[in-house]
Image (tube, rainbow, N blue to C red):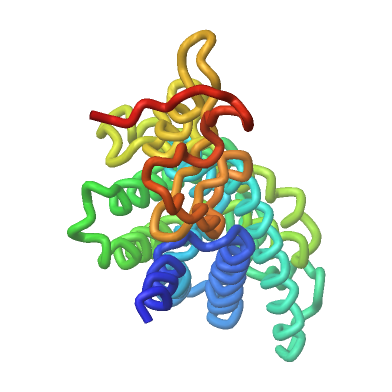
């Protein structure tokens, strides 16, 4: 019974596998684009309704699947988190791919649903699916200004995310998704009349692909500016406010990041000085073993049973060869 309880506890504390994280990022981005852009299409881009739709959706999905992947749902957030030491570049790259796929699939589903509206035409620039722009449709904004405002707002958005999810802010962790959602809603209130509000490349690319016309041509600022803004936030936050925890392995710019305790323990167990043999002792915690090559936890292997004779040498250690006349002196 104790073994079963221990196994259940270990399973609960083990980090989710990458496949679950990618599914969470896909699902979160899919719902964000479907609901946010869907409300924009159905309400004629009403500022309050659309802003609240995006803000409340990111809040709900962060509560729903944030524990699995961190609830990024945005390539700019993943890039900022990787530079800030919160997630490895390997995971961030996989997250970004899942987010773009989620945004594109959501825009496709929204297009299918919008075909039921009278007068809606697929791939018609006069009926965009919540696409972003700067001099198309209702927008009359200079391209340089669109780049600048999207960069600044994404910087502030990712900065808020890094702040409210800082481990030193653990007392407010339950409110973090709500703070993130409110921030996104307020950003929409300002940017909807200017650019339609991006601050998220995955949210911009999907609707642009299915809106046709100049919406595709004008999508490039909303891929570049949020990426730069998120990267700047990931760089500025730890420099200005420090770190709540050591950077995870494989994050940041490499070399300058301190390894986490598991990496430090692994490096120490590999042997140190010249001429000393390397030791390959596994890192085991709560029934899980750290795999340094794959950078993930795997079920721990059972250790060999102890020797029956306490005076016998440990397994794998030195013992006199068979037939040797060496006399082993007993301890005093």
Question: Compared with residue 315, is residue 2 higher up or lower down, i.e. above or below?
Answer: below
Pick the residue in front: 112 or 177: 177
Residue 210 vs 113, above or below: the answer is above
Residue 48 location (% of width, % of height): 40, 73
Q: Residue at x 40, y 53 (%)?
A: 285
Q: Is residue 58 visible?
A: no
Q: Is residue 56 above or below residue 220?
A: below
* Relative horizontal placement of residue 297, taking residue 55 as reference (left or right): right
Question: Percent position (x, y) of residue 207?
Answer: 69, 64
**Whether residue 260 is situated above or below residue 206 in the rendered picture:** above
Residue 144 visible here: yes
Locate residue 172 relative to residue 61 in the image: left or right. Answer: left
Residue visible at 28% across and 41% down in the picture: 244
Picture coordinates of residue 20 (x, y %)? 59, 66
Which residue lies at the image location 53% right of the left edge and 72% below the top edge? 36
Q: In the orientation shown, which residue stands out farthest toward the top?
A: 274
Numbered circles on residues, count: 0
Where is residue 73 shown, x and y percent of the image? 53, 60
Relative side of 6 to 278, left or right: left
Depth check: give the residue in front, 225 or 146.
Answer: 225
Q: Is residue 107 left or right of residue 167?
A: right
Q: Quadrant of the N terminus?
A: bottom left
Could you say which is closer to the camera, residue 6 or residue 292? 6
Quadrant for the C terminus in the image: top left
Which residue appears at 62% of the width and 67% of the height? 23
Q: Nearer the viewer, residue 12 or 48?
A: 12
């Amino acid at each position: 019974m104790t073994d079963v309880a221990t196994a259940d506890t270990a399973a609960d504390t083990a980090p989710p596998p990458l496949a679950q994280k990618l599914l969470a990022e896909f699902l979160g981005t899919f719902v964000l684009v479907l609901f946010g852009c869907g409300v924009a299409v159905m309400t004629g881009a009403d500022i309050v309704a659309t802003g609240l739709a995006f803000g409340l959706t990111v809040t709900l999905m962060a509560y729903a699947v944030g524990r699995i992947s961190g609830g990024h749902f945005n390539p700019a957030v993943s890039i900022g988190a990787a530079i800030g030491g919160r997630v490895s570049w390997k995971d961030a790259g996989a997250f970004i791919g899942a987010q773009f796929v989620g945004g594109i699939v959501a825009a496709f589903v929204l297009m299918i649903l919008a075909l039921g509206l009278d007068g809606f035409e697929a791939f018609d620039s006069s009926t965009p699916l919540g696409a972003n722009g700067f001099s198309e449709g209702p927008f009359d904004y200079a391209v340089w200004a669109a780049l600048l405002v999207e960069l600044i707002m994404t910087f502030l958005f990712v900065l808020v995310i890094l702040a409210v999810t800082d481990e030193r802010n653990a007392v407010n962790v339950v409110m973090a998704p709500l703070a993130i959602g409110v921030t996104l809603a307020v950003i929409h209130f300002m940017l909807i009349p200017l650019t339609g509000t991006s601050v998220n490349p995955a949210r911009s690319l999907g609707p642009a692909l299915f809106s046709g016309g100049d919406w595709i041509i004008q999508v490039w600022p909303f891929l570049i500016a949020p990426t730069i803004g998120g990267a700047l936030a990931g760089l500025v936050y730890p420099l200005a406010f420090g770190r709540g925890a050591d950077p995870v392995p494989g994050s940041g710019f490499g070399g300058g990041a301190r390894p986490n305790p598991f990496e430090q323990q692994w490096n120490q167990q590999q042997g140190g000085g010249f001429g000393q043999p390397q030791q390959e002792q596994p890192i085991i915690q709560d029934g899980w073993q750290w795999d340094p090559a794959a950078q993930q936890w795997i079920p721990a292997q059972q250790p060999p049973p102890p020797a029956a004779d306490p005076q016998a040498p440990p397994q794998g250690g030195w013992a006199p060869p068979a037939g040797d006349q060496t006399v082993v002196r007993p301890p005093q």
